[in-house]
């Protein structure tokens, strides 16, 4: 396309075109791209011109057309954002910058790069929706010329188009562009399927051409007789939509009944319903196939009446009835709104949000960006938002909420407000209490039952259908865990400062946040609670000149006190004689002909399913059935013995078990935990320590307990202690 042709294309719909601006952009882009070539061998400059040509079909303003001509200059040439701002204005500079990929990020995966680039795109779209229109036109031309791209890249680009850009075009109402993107992607991803379906559709069109014309003529005649001005056109489904329906419903091509349909364009909205009444009077309607998207528009602003009737020749005929304005919005989506030209400021965006439900969806999607999700998570949530076959539900006050099919009351709650979703504990559907994870249907009235302070369970994350709900649940659970660690960290820090007779407060921590590499006081406390920051480092950050000196409390025992004795080889300690009057603890199974022992790493207790392992010359070792150590004996079936418990209820006997606890590293912790264990009636047989971090120690307790219930009680008591971060049973 030549320079004057571009100007003329814009002049056709905008007589006040800024010719000078378009000419300067044309010349500048041609010089910037210079001798660059595309994969097809054509001059690279042809690509931005074709993108601009696509946008002229949408009748976009001069700034958008110029941005299309310049959209690759920053990314692929030596041009800078500052130069674009200086030559063409900051508005165009912002549009071009929003279309520039982030190439210099040091990200591990291609998916992360893809997520970050898409994040940047949507952030730019939030500022100016025209960025998205240019991007979609750019992708459309790239798909039209994809056959020139190396084979190894085609599948990735086509899949990305099918996953993100085609659904995105659909969500902002640009159906014609969406259909072309889907068809082009389908052609490259499944060439054999595309060819087969396209041939079948061609055969059908050839076979049924006369029948389609006959239906068109009959409909026009009926409308004319009733005084309704209407334009009737027949249409055929695209290969991709046919394939998708075959996949979704698991049916063959022959079972499809709505390959052909008819679009009826009438004058005012009232004529839509009059035309519908006429059609339903003349031909019987198919139950369950009527949808009123005029009274309840789709989230992409789509409005129309859909019905299916048994028409001429006893064939199913699908009909769409809409006004000319509705048809323009169905074809061009956001671009059909007159306000898009002025949607650059805050007022313009607010007006566009009122006018366009699709733009409101874009703004809501951006809420996912504000809370620091990883690029991969953001991409996942966005895909969830894009692939939606909708249901419409109502609030108790009559508000309409559009949700994806298979959505739950939890999705509904988060769609209303994030706070409502976080506090949701139950739901009423049509006045009846229902499970919060039940699937909603069209027309359901949903009332959410709340409980302040409630934290959504992590299991909800995999059960909800919307990206917004999934992101909010993940965020809420992260915050809850973070608060727990922050609470534990606060205890650690306060106790550390008490030991050194210093005072701590949030005001003292705020000035040293940069020294600790954290953004807030809560971040510091959470890091201490997780063991990422040593409490001593916090003291040194607040008091740089402080040197910690721990005082050791010494207990002196007189040599004449009963029960105590010294050892000549060690004068620093004394020992207490054991009470020999008490009988040894009897353990069932340790008596008999064959020596019996329990697993050396973890033991076994009544309540465990157990197995015996015979070692010739040594005896039998009892293992819990879930012990990982048993895998070593998989190839030795002759050593396995069936074993069961034979416990005398009248005699309290104790059995070995191992518990691992992560607890605070401070004086008195071991004594407190040992007391808790003793209060449950369990016996400590052995204790070992491992350094976990400066603030934590891992304590390994070899215990003797009565049974599995007794062991569970011990673990529960330990978990209740504020000194303990983590407790679990170890089975070796």
Image: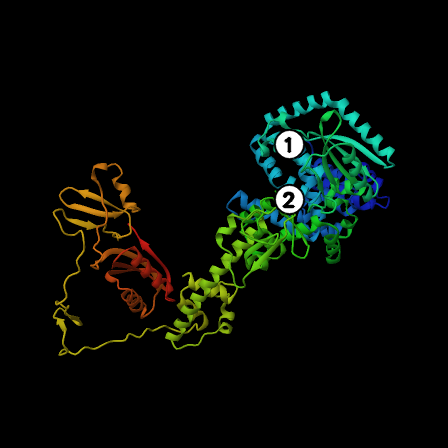
The residue that label 2 is drawn on is: 390
- Counting residues from the start of the chain, the first of labels 1 and 2 encountered is 1
Query: How many C-alpha atoms fall within 10 Å of the one at disc 2: few (<14), some, or many (≥20)?
Result: some
Q: Position of residue 167 (x, y in %)?
A: 64, 41
| SS of the residue under disc 2 | strand
Residue ID at (13%, 43%): 617
State the mark number for residue 190: none
Q: Position of residue 601 (x, y in %)?
A: 25, 52
Please determine whether, in this image, residue 264 is positioned above or below residue 373: above
Which residue is more in the foreground, 128 or 230?
230
Please determine whether, in this image, residue 453 is positioned above or below residue 78: below
> Disc 1 to disc 2, how far (Cα)?
20 Å
**Image quadrant for the N terminus?**
top right
Q: Position of residue 173 (x, y in %)?
A: 71, 43
Q: Are marks 1 and 2 in contact (CB under 8 Å)?
A: no
Number of marks drawn: 2
Residue ID at (68%, 29%): 259
In the displayed structure image, the side of residue 289 where residue 321 appears, left or right: right
In the displayed structure image, the side of residue 341 where residue 425 appears, left or right: left
Query: How many C-alpha atoms fall within 10 Å of the one at disc 1: few (<14), some, or many (≥20)?
Result: many
| SS of the residue under disc 1 | helix
Q: Position of residue 552 (x, y in %)?
A: 28, 74
Residue ID at (78%, 50%): 339
Camera sees residue 537: yes
The residue that label 1 is drawn on is: 240
């Amino acid at each position: 396309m030549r320079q004057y042709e571009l100007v003329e294309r814009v002049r056709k719909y905008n007589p006040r075109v800024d010719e000078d601006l378009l000419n300067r952009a044309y010349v500048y882009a041609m010089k910037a791209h210079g001798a660059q070539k595309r994969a097809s061998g054509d001059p690279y400059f042809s690509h931005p011109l074709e993108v601009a040509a696509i946008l002229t079909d949408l009748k976009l303003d001069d700034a958008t057309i110029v941005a299309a001509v310049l959209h690759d200059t920053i990314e692929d040439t030596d041009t800078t954002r500052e130069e674009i701002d200086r030559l063409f204005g900051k508005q165009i500079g912002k549009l071009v910058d929003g279309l520039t990929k982030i190439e210099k990020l040091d990200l591990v995966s291609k998916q992360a790069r893809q997520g970050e680039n898409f994040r940047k795109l949507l952030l730019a779209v939030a500022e100016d929706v025209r960025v998205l229109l240019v991007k979609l036109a750019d992708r459309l031309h790239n798909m039209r010329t994809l056959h020139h791209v190396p084979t190894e890249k085609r599948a990735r680009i086509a899949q990305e188009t099918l996953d993100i850009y085609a659904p995105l075009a659909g969500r902002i109402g640009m159906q014609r562009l969406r259909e072309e993107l889907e068809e082009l992607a389908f052609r490259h991803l499944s060439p054999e399927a595309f060819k087969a379906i396209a041939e079948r559709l061609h055969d059908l069109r050839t076979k049924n051409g006369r029948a389609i014309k006959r239906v068109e003529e009959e409909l026009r005649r009926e409308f004319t007789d009733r005084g309704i001005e209407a334009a009737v056109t027949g249409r055929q489904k695209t290969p991709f939509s046919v394939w998708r329906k075959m996949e979704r419903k698991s049916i063959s091509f022959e079972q499809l009944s709505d390959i052909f349909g008819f679009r009826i364009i009438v004058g005012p909205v009232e004529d839509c319903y009059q035309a519908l009444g006429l059609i339903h009077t003349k031909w019987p309607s198919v139950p369950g196939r009527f949808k009123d998207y005029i009274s309840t528009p789709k989230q992409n602003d789509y409005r129309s009446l859909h019905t299916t009737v048994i028409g001429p020749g006893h064939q199913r005929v699908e009909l769409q009835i809409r006004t000319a304005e509705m048809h323009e919005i169905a074809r061009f989506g956001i671009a059909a709104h007159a306000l898009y030209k002025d949607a650059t400021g805050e007022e313009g965006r607010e007006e566009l949000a009122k006018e366009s439900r699709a733009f409101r969806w874009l703004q809501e999607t951006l809420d996912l960006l504000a809370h620091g999700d990883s690029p991969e998570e953001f991409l996942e949530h966005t895909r969830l938002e894009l692939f939606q076959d909708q249901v419409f539900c109502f609030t108790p006050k009559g508000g309409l909420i559009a949700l994806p099919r298979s959505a739950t009351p939890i999705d509904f709650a988060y769609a209303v407000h994030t706070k409502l979703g976080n506090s949701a504990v139950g739901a009423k559907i049509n006045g009846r209490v229902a499970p919060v994870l039940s699937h909603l249907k069209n027309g359901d009235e949903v009332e959410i039952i709340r409980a302040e302070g409630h934290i959504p369970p992590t299991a909800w994350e995999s059960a909800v259908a919307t990206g917004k709900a999934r992101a909010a649940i993940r965020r809420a659970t992260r915050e809850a865990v973070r608060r727990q660690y922050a609470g534990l960290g606060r205890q650690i820090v306060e106790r550390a400062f008490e030991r050194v007779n210093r005072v701590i407060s949030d005001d003292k921590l705020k000035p040293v946040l940069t020294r600790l590499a954290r953004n807030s006081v809560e971040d510091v406390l959470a890091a201490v609670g997780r063991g990422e920051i040593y409490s001593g480092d916090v003291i040194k950050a607040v008091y740089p000149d402080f040197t910690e000196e721990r005082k050791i409390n010494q207990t002196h025992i007189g040599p004449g006190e009963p029960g105590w004795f010294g050892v000549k080889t060690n004068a620093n300690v004394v020992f207490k004689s054991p009470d020999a009057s008490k009988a040894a603890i009897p353990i069932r199974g340790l008596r008999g002909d064959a020596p019996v022992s329990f697993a050396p790493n973890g033991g076994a207790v009544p309540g465990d399913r157990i197995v015996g392992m015979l070692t010739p010359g040594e005896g039998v070792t009892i293992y819990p059935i879930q012990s990982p150590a048993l895998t070593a004996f998989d190839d030795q079936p002759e050593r396995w013995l069936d074993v069961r418990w034979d416990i005398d209820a009248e005699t309290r006997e104790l059995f070995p078990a191992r518990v691992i606890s992560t607890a605070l590293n401070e004086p008195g912790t071991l004594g407190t935990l040992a007391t808790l264990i003793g209060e449950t009636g369990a016996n400590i047989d052995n204790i070992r320590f491992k350094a976990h971090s400066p603030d934590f120690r891992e304590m390994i307790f070899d215990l003797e307990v009565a049974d599995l219930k007794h062991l569970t009680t011990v673990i529960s008591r330990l978990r209740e202690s504020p000194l303990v971060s983590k407790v679990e049973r170890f089975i070796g």
